[in-house]
Image: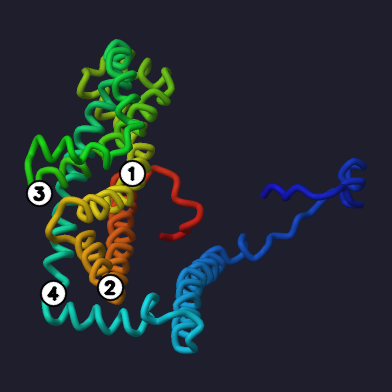
Amino acid sequence: MTAALRPPGPEDDDAAAGRLVVRRPGPAELRPRRTHRRRRALELSLAVAVPLLLVLLWQLAAGRAWIDARVYPAPSTILADGWDRALAGDLWPDVAATVRRVLAGYALGTVAGYLLGLLMGSLPLVRAALEPLLDALYVVPKLALLPVFLNMFGLGEGPQVALVAATVFFFVWISTMAAVLAIPSGHRDAGRVFGASPWQMFRHVLLPASLPAVLVGARIAAGVAVLVIVASEQIAATDGLGHLIFDSRALFQNDVMCVGIVCVAGLGVLFSELVRRAGRLLTPWAPRDRGRSGG
């Protein structure tokens, strides 16, 4: 084992004099599984304790009238209202509408972004022809494209799905193109030496080398897709969580508004986590998240 960096000490003099230096193994080396379990337990405890502490503080502030409970309902009130709406069946249609639009737009944007990113990363002439145009479109706020999609698809699901797809497309396209460009030339040269066909080059060189970075972009796009669809539903939709939040705020139903916000937060976390776990299954060779040991 390599010793950690430290100030020079007497043992360094011993080493310089030719004496044997012994480094005693620590708990991580002696009991790696036990150390890993303890670290994982600590991480989970912190992940649960911090949000729980904030919720308890919020509940206390509302109960002691430190904040106006009419504007900032207590968590218990939000939970009770959400439970009642779920049992009555009033919440699920909005959740289903948002999930449906996110999944459809995310699938379209991911496929289009990956294919074009792979093409532009592999062919310099295609990259030279399309990159300036896509760079210009990338900096346009995606909500500014909603009127364009409304003119193209009319009212309904089309504009919402198209907006999510356009948003996801740019994240996946950029990450894919950058990942393909970052592949060492030696990998491609080795494939050519062995006479790899274009499909074999993609299957055995480009795909495994670029997929970890592509999935990072896809995971970021998953969270952004939820943000965009909620904003879009507040502007041009008659259902969905975004419409629920905006409509309840207009009616000063702040408890219902908070129920919608909590659902959006849960949906974003769930969607991002599903993409992360799918990435783990697809790329077992990729380094694990250092902040999510064992996850």
Residue 130, horizontal then vertical, whole percent: 28, 18
Q: Which mark is residue 252?
A: 2
176 and 6: which is toward the camera: 176
Q: Which residue is mark 1?
A: 283
Q: Quadrant of residue 138?
A: top left
8 and 104: which is toward the camera: 104
> Marks 1/2: CA distance?
47 Å
> Marks 1/4: CA distance?
40 Å
Q: Earlier in the sequence, mark 2 or mark 4?
A: 4
Q: Amino acid at mark 3?
A: Glu
Q: Which mark is residue 85?
A: none
* Residue at 30 percent of width and 28 percent of height: 137
Q: Amino acid at mark 1?
A: Thr
Which type of secondary structure does the marked residue at label 2 adopt? Answer: loop
57 and 50: which is toward the camera: 57
- Asked if the residue at tag 4 contacts the one at tag 3, i.e. Cβ–Cβ closer than 8 Å, the answer is no
- Asked if the residue at tag 4 contacts the one at tag 2, i.e. Cβ–Cβ closer than 8 Å, the answer is no
Q: Amino acid at mark 4?
A: Asp
Q: Which residue is mark 3?
A: 157
Residue 120, horizontal then vertical, whole percent: 29, 20
Q: Which residue is mark 4?
A: 90
Mark 2 crowdedness (10 Å alpha carbons): few <14, some 14-19, many ≥20:
few
